[in-house]
Amino acid sequence: MRALLKYTLLPLFLFQACSNEIKEEKFDIDWIYSDEGRMVGASYNTAWINDNTLYLMDMRKPKEERTLLKMNPNSSMKMVPVVNSEKISKSILSAVGRTDTSMYIEWPSSFSSTGNHGIYFFEEDIYILDVPNESYRRITNTKSEEKAARFSPDGKKISFVRENDIYIYDIRTQKEKRITFSGSETNLNGTVSWVYWEEIFGRKDLGYWWSDDSKAIAFLNTDESEVTKMHYVHWKPAESELITQRYPKAGTKNPVVKLGIIELTSSKLKWVDLDPFEYLCRVKWLPGNKRLSVQTMNRAQDKLDLFFVDRATGKNVKKILTETDSGWVNITDDLYFLDKSFIWQSERNGYAHLYQFSYEGKLINQITDGNWALRSSGGTFWMRQSVVNIDEKNKQIYYTAMKESSVERHLYRSSLDGKTMEKLSGPAGVHKIYFNEGGSYYLDVFSDRTSPPTLTLHNKDGKAAHTLIGDRPEILAEYDLQTPELFTIPTRDNFMMPAQILKPKDFNPSKKYPVIFHVYGGPSAPTVFDRWQGQSLFFDNMLLNKGYLIVKFDHRASTAISKKLENHVLKAMSGPIEREDLVDGIKWLKAQSYTDPSRFGVWGWSGGGSFTLNMMTNTKEFQAGVSVAPVTDWHYYDTKWAEFGMKRPVDNPEGYESTSFVKTAKNLHGSLLLVHGTYDDNVHPQNSWHFIDELVKENIQFEMMFYPMRKHGIADDEARIHLYTKMLSFWELNL
């Protein structure tokens, strides 16, 4: 295989060291990032439509064979094509202006409420799929980029942002209307600045919100003029290009945000009169569309306020409740309005639970309680949304939580008065739940560490109604895959850290194996789950076949078990407190009969890249490490994330000093491969530049790999293949 043949010139002693472990692999890195590799373990893309119709696309099939399917569980469990694939493909080619024949149907960014239309982006213009007519239509054709497109609730219009102003497109008349007029390079309407996109809205451009009656839009206006500038150089053109990004560093000025409400029939604009705040975190319309809710937060992020605002005036602002925390308040999307009350997620007792309040902000009752937490089963880890359905008629609420175990996610149902609770999901593992709008059915995407996802349809009581994708044991057999074992590792104070280990099929407990520890870290950012691990499992199996054991474990603040554990890292994120747990875990592993204490490696990406440097400059536990896109000093990261745990540099200078790996670079122990994209707009390359400079000052040798014009994820296939090939080579040479 290609990935193995590349190493035929390695010194003989390397092969002697690993000869017993090397096996013929049924895949290589190129295959992992191929379409075929991605289809292994894939499921359906799905969307519920208002009429209880389920739209699906089978992602297990090659792209050219995929089509849009539908199923109505009220009438039939049969999936039928929605459109003629050949006709649609020709329509796409015509709309885009292409003459080749390689176009195929993709899953749209969103569907209208009726399911009659879907939104697509091609080369920064917007297209819509007309489902009844089986055709594509181009709705924008400009030199400017259009973004943040979404349907109005009634499905009759499409809103989008162009040159930082909001536009409305009428699907019937095919005419667009501009509704804001102040957009500029630093004044944004309806789209968000980088720090809001990344940290507050979970990598979603949520800069405006339609009212449910489709007659008004609430939107953010963002002034970035005082925000710190970051610069990147694109060196490939003969005349290099300078790229500028507005990015607020810790301790610097944030973008200034205000909330507007615009009536679409009259074009009347009102600005909401809010108390002073630092972050505007959430906006949601109340039933009846006469009021909207707004969540704001202070700079220290230890206080969050919920307001109700009058639509007609933008005034009559009423503070409904306030959340406070000794560390920081986590933003939640679990806010739901009922007839005479609303549901709210809070961590006020140290665990994430649901509460019911009156519209005046009076606590009615706590719905869930116990030494466990609500937790979503998908999405970015810093987003908090666990409620999946509310049946107000029967006074029941459905949500996902980690009550059984911190490595599992299950579906539960409780009465709104909190007196009853029952588990609805089946086997141990992770269940991702998607209810239809009426709440009569839900989809369960289930996997555990030993099996790829299954997809089943259930009624609201948990009874399975139909299996779309069943068990697929043939995948494990075909690729001869080993899957992780779950266990726990004790710390010095007997906190039991969730852990997993991958062992070869012929594992011999009397043999000494080298170990690679894969780490992430960060508050409430677990890496250990009882779920299918996708592409990473294939790469880990390649390492297994080269003789390594692969280990993950989570320090107490990263487990997501409770806010109490999260707060352990206050004013010292990625610092000595978290390192203490990780060192305990590594020492425990070194004491096991089957590990070689002299051959331990560590690697991670982003926060994991930071922890790699933390361990390699503050301990001597590792002989080699790979650090990808690390934060090396919190001064270099953004306000929202750096300051929630660290607070401002002026308020916590000792903490910023004790967590700076630039300061400890001179103590680097072991062989290091440092990796960064030169256009990383999340963790800026200056993090690595400064760390490297300190290594140079001390004449400390290391390896480095920079990927030109790649962002934080180094996401294109060519770069990923190159990076993981380099990592394989690095481990063979250094561990």
Image (spheres, rainbow, N blue to C red):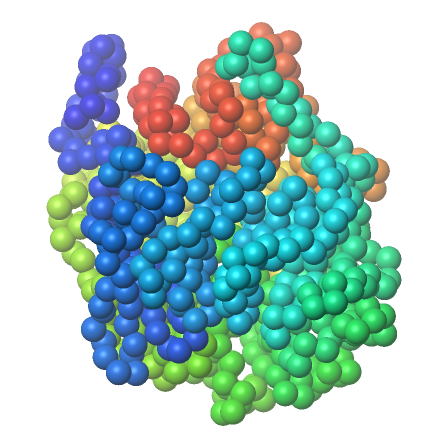
In this picture, residue 99 sits left or right of residue 163: left
In depth, the one of 365 and 507 nearer the eye is 365
Image height of 112 relative to 479, above or below:
below
In depth, the one of 602 and 3 nearer the eye is 3
- Residue drawn at the location 58% of the way across and 7% of the way down: 699
Image height of 502 relative to 616, above or below:
below
Instruction: Specify whether residue 577 is in view.
Output: no
- Residue drawn at the location 40% of the way across and 68% of the way down: 115
Question: Residue most toward the front?
Answer: 173
In depth, the one of 168 and 518 nearer the eye is 168
- Residue drawn at the location 58% of the way across and 89% of the way down: 417
Quadrant including the C terminus:
top left
- Residue drawn at the location 73% of the way across and 40% of the way down: 184
In this picture, residue 463 sits left or right of residue 641: left
In this picture, residue 663 sits left or right of residue 701: right
Residue 515: image quadrant is top left
In this picture, residue 326 sits left or right of residue 60: right
Callout count:
0
Question: Residue most toward the bottom?
Answer: 394
Quadrant including the N terminus:
top left
Instruction: Specify whether residue 171 is in view.
Output: yes
Residue 283 coordinates in the image, percent (x, y): 68, 64
Residue 166 coordinates in the image, percent (x, y): 66, 52
Residue 711 coordinates in the image, percent (x, y): 52, 31
